[in-house]
């Protein structure tokens, strides 16, 4: 006898609960080990001033951490990124939702979104410094300009993909507007918002480093530019490695757990497929 839907769901749900966030930890570790192995294998064929080995770079990164110098510059970089992404989210949500529900607004902003996705971030970093000088706002403004089109695009697509039948059903049942937005609209938009935020963050890290390299006197980009001017490949790679480790820590320690908690109601691909076949 074919099991009913309630009987089919428990078979897959516990597997997701047991595995948790560390279910693919061995794959992550293997990926990093392969990358480090390739780096260690290639480095001996080059002088240290061209390509230092991973152990030498790791020791230099540890010295940077231990001195406390890294955390000062990382603080300025992180604050600029958070300020820029927050502004981009505000712009992206307002314009993206408007484009999704209003055809005229969609037509009006479509060309601007395309232009924003096309213009390089380096150009906006230079223009921002010329406009606002060597200030934090110059970096924040360039992040907003570069990342908001990507976030807007995701929110726009998410709004257009809303299941209007659920909204109509809720209206038929005379559900309050606030309940419809909270229980139907927002949960469907969250995956698109998270996707846009992740893409926006990935762009924001690059833009802020470029902005800091252009002329700001503090931040990770400033340090990389400083040691580049002194032709110190070891220091450049050490600062880059330290910066990368912090980004990975934020990704897997903050963003990923939040994403899993917010979207825990959504079945995974293999679970959804198993439910469909039940």
Image (spheres, rainbow, N blue to C red):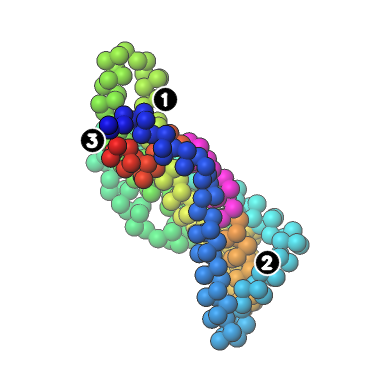
Label 3, label 2: how far apart the Cα atoms are = 52 Å
Task: Decide if residue 44 is on the left or right side of residue 261.
Answer: right
**Numbered badge on residue 182:** 1
Describe the element under mark 3 as helix, strand or loop.
helix
Which quadrant: the C terminus? top left
Query: What's the magenta region?
Result: 248-262
Camera-near label (3 vs 2) is: 2
Q: Which of marks 3 and 1 is in front?
A: 1
**Image check: 129 left or right of 223?**
left
Residue 228 in view = yes
Task: Check the image and report above or below for 83 versus 8.
Answer: below
Q: Which residue is denoted by mark 3 in the rendering?
A: 103
Residue 257, quarter of picture: top right
Looking at the rendered structure, the number of numbered marks drawn on it comes to 3
Helix, strand or loop at label 1? It is helix
- Locate residue 30, reporting x and y percent: 52, 64
State the separation of the CA atoms marked 1 and 2.
46 Å
Q: What element carries label 2?
A: helix
Query: Which quarter of the figure has residue 41?
Result: bottom right
Q: Which of 229 and 34 is in front in this view?
A: 34
How packed mark 3 is, by other alpha carbons closer than 10 Å (few <14, some 14-19, many 20 or more), is few
Image point (75%, 61%), residue name: 66
Q: Is residue 85 above or below residue 93?
A: below
Where is residue 94? Give x, y as percent.
39, 35
Front in this rendered view, residue 33 or 201: 33
Q: Would you name the residue on which mark 2 appears?
A: 61
Mark closest to the chain's N terminus, 3 or 1: 3
């Amino acid at each position: 006898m074919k099991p009913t839907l309630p009987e089919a769901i428990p078979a897959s749900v516990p597997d997701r609960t047991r595995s948790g966030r560390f279910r693919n930890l061995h794959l992550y570790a293997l990926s990093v080990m392969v990358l480090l192995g390739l780096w260690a294998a290639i480095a001996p064929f080059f002088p240290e001033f061209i390509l230092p080995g991973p152990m030498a770079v790791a020791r230099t990164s540890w010295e940077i951490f231990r001195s406390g110098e890294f955390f000062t510059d990382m603080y300025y970089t992180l604050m600029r990124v958070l300020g820029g992404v927050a502004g981009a989210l505000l712009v992206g949500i307002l314009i993206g939702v408007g484009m999704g529900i209003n055809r005229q607004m969609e037509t009006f902003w479509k060309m601007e979104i395309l232009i924003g996705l096309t213009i390089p971030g380096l150009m906006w970093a230079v223009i921002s410094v010329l406009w606002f000088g060597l200030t934090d706002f110059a970096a924040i403004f360039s992040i907003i300009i570069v990342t908001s089109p990507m976030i807007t695009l995701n929110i726009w697509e998410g709004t257009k993909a809303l299941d209007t039948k659920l909204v109509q059903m809720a209206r038929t049942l005379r559900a309050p507007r606030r309940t419809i937005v909270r229980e139907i609209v927002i949960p469907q938009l969250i995956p698109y918002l998270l996707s846009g935020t992740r893409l926006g963050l990935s762009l924001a890290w690059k833009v802020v480093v470029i902005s800091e390299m252009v002329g700001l006197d503090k931040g990770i980009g400033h340090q990389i530019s400083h040691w580049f001017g002194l032709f110190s490949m070891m220091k450049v790679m050490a600062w880059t490695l330290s910066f990368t480790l912090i980004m990975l820590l934020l990704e897997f320690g903050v963003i990923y757990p939040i994403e899993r908690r917010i979207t825990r109601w959504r079945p995974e691909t293999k679970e959804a497929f198993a439910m469909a076949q039940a």
